[in-house]
């Protein structure tokens, strides 16, 4: 096997090492799906893996850029989750919470009964709270029903 230089390792790491939790990133990739052109989602202009576009951001991106945006967005959600959760969590519980916050938004996550129950130590109650967040614009969305069930399952594993 060929010896690798430190620079070569750093380049490989920059291309494939995740600062964000890989479980959360993988879960989000599966549930968000990839769109390289801008689309409207619940009234927000989005791109990639559910990244909400900001003024000046391109409405067309590469798959590589979509992954960069996802990792960056996950890191933001991880900080919010880590600051708000006052009890110990498993890696899978944290990944489920990050996915939930990613989808419902920081504000909704922070004021949710789900977070209140978690911080009160009601782990079983938390699992039931995921299923209450299945509506978009007032309608029950089958994709959200599945996602919340998957988040609850991940949280419980």
Image (spheres, rainbow, N blue to C red):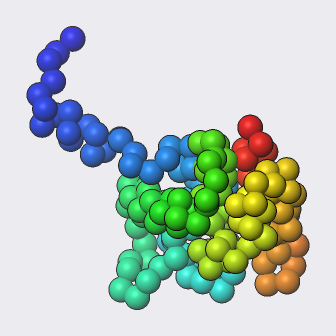
Can you tell which quarter of the image residue 68 is in? bottom left
Farthest top residue in view: 1
The spot of residue 103 in percent (x, y) is: 65, 68
**Image quarter of the C terminus:** top right
- 2 vs 93, nearest the viewer: 93
Between 130 and 56, the one lying in front of the other is 130
User: Residue 19 vs residue 107: left or right?
Assistant: left
Seen at 48% across and 63% down, the residue is: 79
Quadrant assignment for the N terminus: top left
Q: Where does residue 140 sit, x and y in percent of width and height?
A: 88, 73
Residue 98 vs 141, above or below: the answer is above
Residue 118 spot, x, y in % from top left = 73, 58
**Can residue 30 be seen in the rendering of this structure?**
no
Is residue 92 visible in the rendered image? The answer is yes
Residue shown at 45%/60% (left/top)? 75
The residue that appears at 66% across and 86% down in the rendered structure is 43
2 lies left or right of 115: left
Q: Residue at the spot x=70%, y=61% of the render?
A: 119
Q: How many marks?
A: 0
């Amino acid at each position: 096997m060929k010896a690798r230089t430190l620079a070569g390792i750093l380049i490989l790491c920059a291309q494939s090492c995740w600062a964000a939790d890989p479980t959360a990133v993988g879960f989000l990739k599966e549930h968000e799906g990839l769109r390289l052109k801008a689309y409207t989602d619940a009234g927000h202009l989005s791109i990639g893996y559910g990244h909400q576009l900001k003024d000046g951001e391109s409405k067309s991106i590469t798959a590589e850029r979509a992954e960069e945006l996802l990792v960056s967005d996950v890191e933001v959600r991880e900080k919010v989750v880590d600051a708000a959760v006052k009890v110990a969590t498993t890696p899978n519980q944290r990944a489920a919470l990050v996915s939930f916050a990613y989808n419902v938004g920081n504000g909704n996550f922070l004021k949710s009964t789900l977070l209140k129950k978690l911080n009160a130590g009601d782990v079983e109650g938390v699992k039931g709270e995921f299923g209450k967040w299945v509506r978009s614009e007032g309608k029950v969305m089958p994709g959200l029903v599945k996602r919340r069930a998957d988040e609850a399952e991940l949280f419980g594993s």
